[in-house]
Image (cartoon, helix red, strand yellow):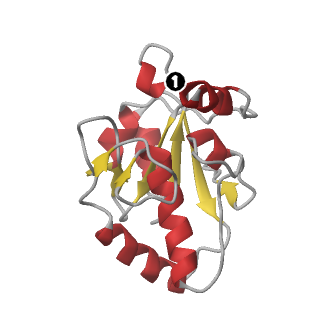
């Protein structure tokens, strides 16, 4: 039942068009505009079951992406350009209220959450993480630390999917058109 609900939650999401970049020159231009806290949501990959829901990762520094990519792999950081070059379709989201105060608390929460394993858990459970729950948790916990409530999960359910983040009213889609 949980698997069915999880699958159903992703498949009924509104699926906006993804931005697509193909050349490395375009990826370099995009990477220069990314900021700490930006969320990268990739398209669904029907050839890999773990990617049927899409994937989400987060910018943890000017040039690094942080993520919980798959089972048996915990937190992982990589340079953004090689990471993006492996993606065919992605969209970048930016929290509308991301300011310096939020950024400081956000970075503290990143450093506190790098030692977990990948596991599907309730979204408020910080004993383990999966990709979109990790992103959701960072925003939820940071807001909580700053004294307010924030649930960036568009569906508001037990689990959070990459497409719940994509459809959240709290994020703007970043445009890279000059």
Horizontal and vertical percent position of residue 103 = 48, 77
Nearest the eye: 83 or 156:
156
User: Crowding at label 1, few (<14), some or many (≥20) Cα neighbours within 10 Å?
Assistant: some
Horizontal and vertical percent position of residue 163 = 63, 39
What residue does disc 1 label? 52
- Give the residue at x 65% y 63%: 151
- Give the residue at x 71% y 50%: 154
Horizontal and vertical percent position of residue 71 = 30, 35
Q: Secondary structure at mark 1?
A: loop
- Give the residue at x 56% y 42%: 162
User: Quarter-wise, where is residue 134 in the image?
Assistant: bottom left
Nearest the eye: 5 or 160:
5
Name the quadrant of the N terminus. Answer: top right
Q: Is residue 156 left or right of residue 51?
A: right
Q: Tell me, yes or no, if residue 177 can be seen here.
A: no
- Give the residue at x 59% y 74%: 98
Q: Tell me, yes or no, if residue 47 can be seen here.
A: yes
Q: Is residue 154 left or right of residue 43?
A: right
Horizontal and vertical percent position of residue 72 = 23, 36
User: Quarter-wise, where is residue 159 in the image?
Assistant: top right
Relative to 105, residue 51 above or below: above
Count of all numbered marks drawn on residues in the image:
1
As drawn, the residue found furthest toward the front would be 1
As drawn, the residue found furthest toward the top would be 47
Relative to 107, residue 94 above or below: above
Nearest the eye: 129 or 127:
127
């Amino acid at each position: 039942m949980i698997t069915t609900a999880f699958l159903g939650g992703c498949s009924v999401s509104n699926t906006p068009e993804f931005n697509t970049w193909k050349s490395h020159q375009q990826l370099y231009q995009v990477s220069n505009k990314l900021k700490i806290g930006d969320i990268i949501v990739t398209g669904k990959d029907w050839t890999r079951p773990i990617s049927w829901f899409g994937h989400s990762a987060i910018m943890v520094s000017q040039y690094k992406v942080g993520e919980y990519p798959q089972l048996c792999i915990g937190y992982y950081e990589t340079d953004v350009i090689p990471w993006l070059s492996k993606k065919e379709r992605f969209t970048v989201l930016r929290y509308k209220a991301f300011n310096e105060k939020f950024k400081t608390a956000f970075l503290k929460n990143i450093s506190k959450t790098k030692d977990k394993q990948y596991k599907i858990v309730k979204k408020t459970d910080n004993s383990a993480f999966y990709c979109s729950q990790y992103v959701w948790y960072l925003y939820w916990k940071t807001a909580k630390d700053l004294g307010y409530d924030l649930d960036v999960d568009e569906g508001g359910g037990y689990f959070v999917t990459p497409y719940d983040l994509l459809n959240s009213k709290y994020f703007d889609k970043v445009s890279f058109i000059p």
